[in-house]
Image (cartoon, rainbow, N blue to C red):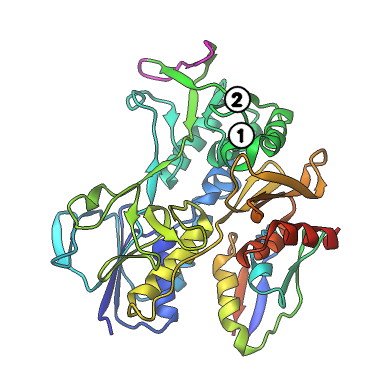
Amino acid sequence: MRSSVTIVGASLAGLRAAETLRRDGFDGTISLIGDEPHVPYDRPPLSKQFLSGDWEADRLALSPPERITGLDLDLRLGQRATGLDVCSHTIEVEGTAEGYDGLLIATGARCRTIRGTEGIDGVYTLRNLDDGLAIRAALRDSPRRVVVVGAGFIGAEVAATAVGYGVPVTMVEALPAPLGRVLGDTVGSVVAELHVDHGVDLRCGVGVEEICGTDSVESVRLSDGAVVETDLVVVGIGVVPNTEWLEDSGLTIDNGVLCDETCLAAPDVTAAGDVARWPNPRYGELMRVEHWDNAVEQGAHAARRLMQSSEEARPFSPVPWFWSDQYDRKVQLAGRARPDDEVRLVDGSFQERRFAVIYGRGGRLTAVFGMNRPRQVMQFKGLLESGASWNEALDFAEVQT
Amino acid sequence: MRIVVDYDLCESNAICMQIAPDVFEVRDDDFLYVLNDAPDEDRRAAMDEAAQRCPKQAIKVED
């Protein structure tokens, strides 16, 4: 039996890991170490309810204060882990070495930035509470225009929220359609129309050449030669895992902390959430999943893995799932679609923007996407988990409609 | 055990329905219906999972 567990990263995966350990009856010391000064908070509302001003920071708490107190944690906020040596079972926190018994790495990821924009005011990424506060203040300051770079989920949500402020929005996407890489162009174009109908100036198939301005941002120059004047830019072009502190740790770092299929990265070390990359046996490939639900599930799985022998350990084999809220639409995707998968509308219609589509490849069901169709998405997610064939999925759709 | 849903928070993501379809149902009107607000004790692990994986943290499991 372990005497203690050290969790590095005090966000969703780390906190859910600590909660899982306590729920399973672990009564040893749990140290939860996070580099942000804030108590663990939820990130999805940052681009929605928090950014719009409907919620204040106190609504973001991942767990009520009394529940966090009840976990009896050695909670160390505002402290950054700076090094790890798995051979000697030592981590370094703010430069001070300390031993660990079991270690769970959940240091997440940070936003990719556009090179050369570091010193320019008015250019933001959105990941942390402090980012949310800064962008919200900028939106309240009546900018003449906001340029959103990247029409992924963060970009699309920021665009939708900015529209709510009455601020003109230009959204720039390098692909032919928003989310085209995961949804394909047909469904991506429905998402595109949703934004255009709300007044967003959507520019797809163009990249950003330069963000111009000496002290403050003044304009964005696009790859098609267009120049968009602006005083606020939000960049949402993906994230990179926070692994720098693990450089000489003895772990394998390759676009995340490389784990085995049970989330074990080294003896007595597991990883979870955005930072973890592991072979998902369901797909037979290495995955690093940045979704909220994955942080919850993998945090719990990696925590339990620390308490198990290799004989007891089970592989972590989820069907990835996420949601996004844009305007009054809820979009959800479960599974792994590729742009060239077969697509079939199984419920509703694109016109009313209330539909479910399924994706298939090689005779298998690969994914389900829904816009304001949560029931159907979850039903097909169940089929994905049972490994349903394409024909089984089509039969199921037939029975439902 | 009693299941309490905060409908002001609930956004019908329906993950609870997938975890415990005997207790939670999101119907075609996109609203969540609790089919059994006092599940048997042997459903506690599923109820805890539903509460934890609700993106809006809208589900409470009370004793």
Measured as percent of width and height from the top left, residue A81 is found at 24, 55
Residue A220, magenta (yes or no): yes
Count residues near mark 1 (Cα–Cα under 10 Å), then give few for <14, some for 14-19, many for 20+.
many
Quarter of the rendering occupied by the C terminus of chain A? bottom right
Residue A80, magenta (yes or no): no
Instruction: Check the image and report above or below for A78 versus A136.
Output: below
Q: Residue furthest top?
A: A225
Q: Is residue A61 visible?
A: no
**Callout 1 touching callout 2 (CB < 8 Å):** yes
Circle 1 — which element?
A: loop
Image: magenta residue range: A214-225
- Numbered marks: total: 2
Which is nearer the eye, A167 or A257? A257
Mark 1 to mark 2: distance in Å? 8 Å
Circle 2 — which element?
A: strand
- According to the picture, the residue beneath numbered tag 1 turns out to be A178
- According to the picture, the residue beneath numbered tag 2 turns out to be A204
Residue type beneath disc 1: Pro
Residue sitting at 72 percent across and 36 percent down?
A190
- Subunit of mark 1? A
Question: Residue A271 vs residue A384: left or right?
Answer: left
- Subunit of mark 2? A
